[in-house]
Image (cartoon, rainbow, N blue to C red):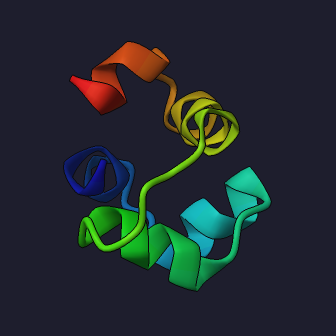
Amino acid sequence: MKRLRKEKGWSQEELADQTGLHRTYISGVERCTRNPTIVAVEKIAVALGVSAGVLVD
């Protein structure tokens, strides 16, 4: 997820804005300290332009 976000040139704040999730939530998911819900995975995948499977693989 972090690699895909950086490829878009987005900060965690930008990804948070694109998904409607909080920046600290995005940070926690990237650091593997939070387990995202399926809904969150889908929001992140849509924002990054990939399938949800790419994120959970």
Q: Is residue 5 above or below residue 29?
A: above
Q: Residue at the location (44% across, 64% down)?
A: 10
In front of the other: 25 or 48 = 25
In front of the other: 55 or 16 = 55
Left or right of 44: which side holds 29? left
Q: Residue at the location (37% across, 60% down)?
A: 9
Left or right of 50: which side holds 44? right
Residue 20, image x and y in percent?
A: 79, 60
Residue 34, image x and y in percent?
A: 41, 67
The image quarter containing residue 6 is: bottom left
Residue 21, image x and y in percent?
A: 71, 64
- Residue 11 seen anywhere in this rendered image of the structure: no
Q: Residue at the location (24% across, 72% down)?
A: 31
Q: Is residue 42 above or below residue 8?
A: above
The quarter in which the C terminus is drawn is: top left
Please give the count of numbered marks on the rendered protein.
0
Left or right of 47: which side holds 17? right
- Residue 33 seen anywhere in this rendered image of the structure: yes
Residue 48, image x and y in percent?
A: 49, 37
Q: Farthest residue toward the right? A: 20
Left or right of 42: which side holds 45? left
Q: Residue at the location (31% across, 29% down)?
A: 56
Q: Is residue 20 above or below residue 36?
A: below
